[in-house]
Structures are given as structure tokens and as C-alpha cells.
């Protein structure tokens, strides 16, 4: 290129070009440019948004299927979540429902957040009887809520 512009003349050319372009620019031209851009590159934008939304859904679904088909947690299992006794009511594909026996409340946890909980499960001793009966078994006794004041007395009596 034989014609080299210095920075002063380039800024003058751009200023003149932008003022001329803006004065001749109308609504139909803007609409045409937008249609051209979206018809050529719009599908990439839409596909990117769908991929971002689908990523979270797919992660939840895969983790749910792993828990649903695995036997680490089954319905009616008695577990301890951070020291609180709970019973698994339902293991679903996207979430797991617990019955918290200390407050008699229901807690629904998305399956992707189960890894963040501290969950303990008591195991039968050497093939013996389980620690607590499942709700469907005839020997099941409903859990009894013990007030905190009675627990303090029990602990003091056990220390003596």
C-alpha cells in the first residue's frame, strides 16, 4: 500500500466518515444489518444460551440417575444428616426427600447438593438386625421427640 496515513489524517478521515454515515443512516438500513447479523450468527447465540441452560439440567439428571439406580440410599433408610436423624422418604431423579424426625419436617434436597451434606448411615452388625426398623416393617416404632431439658438430665445421670 503506497498511501500511508498518519494518525492526525486518520482521525480526520474517521470523523468525516462517521458524520457522513450517521446522517445518511436510516431505520431500514439498521433493520437490514440486524437481520443479516441474526440470520448468519443468531443461531450461535441461541445455541450458546441453550447449552448453558442444558448443562445444569444434564448434571442434575445424571447425578439423580446415579443416586436413583445406586443403592447407597434407599427409601425408608434411617440416616443422620449432620447429626440429625432423618428418614429417606423418596429418592427421585432430580431431588431426594427426607423426613427430619427431630422437628417432624420434610426437607427436599436437589441431588447435586447431596455431596455437600454430611450423611451417615448405620449398618447392620455382621448380618444381624438393623439398628432401626424401616417404616414398612411390623416392628417399627415411631420416633419420640425428647425435650432438650430431659436430654440434659439423661446426660448428667449417665456421667454419674
Image (cartoon, rainbow, N blue to C red):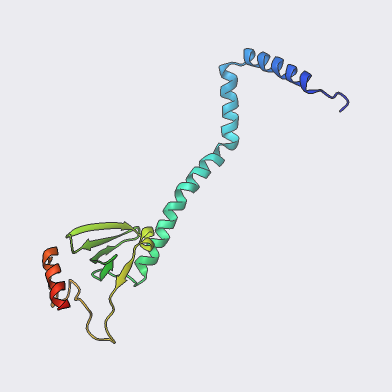
> In which quadrant is the N terminus drawn?
top right
Q: Residue at x 23, y 69 (%)?
A: 76
Q: Residue at x 70, y 17 (%)?
A: 15
Answer with left or right where residue 4 lies relative to residue 53.
Answer: right
Residue 129 placement: quadrant:
bottom left
Residue 128 drawn at (x, y percent): 24, 86
Front-lying residue, 104 or 108: 104
Residue 38, above or below 82: above
Residue 128, above or below 36: below
Answer with left or right where residue 142 lies relative to residue 92.
Answer: left
Residue 22 drawn at (x, y percent): 63, 16
Front-lying residue, 97 or 157: 157
Residue 55 drawn at (x, y percent): 47, 52
Residue 41, above or below 88: above
- Give the farthest residue toward the right: 2
Answer with left or right where residue 29 lies relative to residue 49.
Answer: right
> In which quadrant is the C terminus drawn?
bottom left
Residue 83 placement: quadrant:
bottom left
Residue 143 in view (yes/no)? no
Amino acid at each position: 500500500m503506497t498511501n500511508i496515513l498518519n494518525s492526525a489524517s486518520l482521525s480526520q478521515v474517521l470523523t468525516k466518515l462517521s458524520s457522513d454515515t450517521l446522517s445518511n443512516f436510516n431505520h431500514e438500513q439498521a433493520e437490514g444489518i440486524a437481520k443479516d447479523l441474526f440470520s448468519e450468527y443468531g443461531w450461535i447465540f441461541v445455541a450458546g444460551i441453550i447449552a448453558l441452560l442444558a448443562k445444569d439440567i444434564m448434571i442434575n439428571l445424571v447425578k439423580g440417575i446415579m443416586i436413583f439406580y445406586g443403592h447407597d440410599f434407599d427409601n425408608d433408610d434411617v440416616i443422620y444428616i449432620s447429626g440429625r436423624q432423618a428418614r429417606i422418604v423418596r429418592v427421585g431423579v432430580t431431588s431426594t426427600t427426607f423426613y427430619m424426625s427431630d422437628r417432624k419436617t420434610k426437607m427436599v434436597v436437589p441431588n447435586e447438593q447431596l455431596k455437600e451434606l454430611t450423611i451417615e448411615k448405620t449398618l447392620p452388625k455382621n448380618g444381624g438386625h438393623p439398628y432401626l426398623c424401616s417404616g414398612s416393617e411390623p416392628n417399627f416404632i415411631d420416633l419420640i421427640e425428647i425435650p432438650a431439658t430431659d436430654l440434659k438430665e439423661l446426660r448428667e445421670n449417665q456421667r454419674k
